[in-house]
Image (cartoon, rainbow, N blue to C red):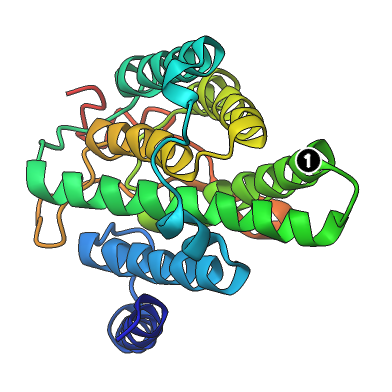
Amino acid sequence: MTLPIAAGLVLILLVLLHLLRWGRHDPDVFSPVAAWSRAGIYACCCLLLGAATGALDALLSDPLVDPGQLTDPLWLASAGLITVFIVWAYWIYWYRNTLRFGRRVEFQPQLLFGLAWGFCTGLLFLSYWHIAAMLVGEWGRWAVWLVAYVMISVWQALWMDMFWDVWVSPEHDSPDSIRAKVLRTHIPNMTLCLAWFAVYENYWIFVGWQTIALLAASFGMRMPSPWNREPTPPARRVPGLLGLPRAGGYVGDTDSGHHPRL
């Protein structure tokens, strides 16, 4: 059974299960198992889009490094600097500026969640690169970069703000930390990594950077395991585009009994 077929079958199963079991779940009560099911649906969709655009085949057939790159000082320096930035931005800055409300480390589930989230998100970004390449035709590599960058930026702004941080992630931000993380982590991450990919086209390294980043996010926000029954606040929802809910960030309800930074 090929990976896309398997992803399609799992997607159908997860959608049906989610509709039957969690379709009417109270959004004011965070459900880890419902959140994981939504994340699984997202992962399957990323795999299917990657297969449809050719990004998955390109990733699986691409070597980790191309001949001559390990002796190219510019390649080594630029890859090293971006790796250092990703580690600082997510494992230090993002990690330290994330609210946890007493949630604990659950190593294996959070490792699995972060690896799947990072791999599938990296593959999704590469799918947008392939779509952009099909759209711009012969306009050149940097035209592809520009179109892909715009597509990814719009998608991420809407997806993270109005779905992922509302229906998947537990509450882990304040209004101030949302703005700060966008400017100091997410925007430079995509700008640097996609520009580097436009020059060198190392698929696995690009996906690896996104996986390193989202592993930090999984551990940093203490993503609860599906079997976790400890109470945790859901995302605070505020009106967004077209009146739809978006993540507003924790504002400090002193009567909640939660301790954000523990």
Q: Residues within 10 Å of mark 1 (few under 14, many from 20)?
A: some
Q: Is residue 58 left or right of residue 210?
A: right
Residue plotted at (28% across, 45% down): 114
Q: Secondary structure at mark 1?
A: helix
Which of the 4 quarters of the picture holds residue 236? top left
* Residue situated in front as seen by the camera: 130 or 155: 130
Locate residue 88: give its quadrant. top left
Residue plotted at (37% across, 27% down): 252
For residue 170, say whether it is visible. Answer: yes
Task: Report x, y in % for residue 21.
Answer: 27, 84
- When asked about the image quadrant of residue 130, the answer is bottom right
The answer to whether residue 72 is left or right of residue 17 is right
Query: Looking at the image, can residue 166 be seen?
Result: no
Q: Position of residue 71 (x, y in %)?
A: 45, 16
Residue lying farthest to the right in this orientation = 139
In this view, 109 is above or below 37:
above
Task: Please state which of residues 112 and 55 is positioned toward the viewer in this rendering.
Answer: 55
Measuring 22% from the left and 66% from the top, which residue is drawn there? Answer: 33
Q: Is residue 52 above or below residue 13?
A: above
Horizontal and vertical percent for residue 129?
Answer: 66, 51
Vertical arrangement, residue 5 with respect to residue 134, above or below = below
Residue placed at 39% from the left, 14% from the top? 84
Q: Nearer the viewer, residue 123 or 64?
A: 64
- Left of 203 or right of it: where is 40? left
In the picture, the quarter occupied by the N terminus is bottom left
Q: Position of residue 172 (x, y in %)?
A: 35, 35
**Callout count:** 1
Q: Quadrant of the C terminus?
A: top left
Disc 1 marks a residue whose amino acid type is Arg
Q: Which residue is mark 1?
A: 141
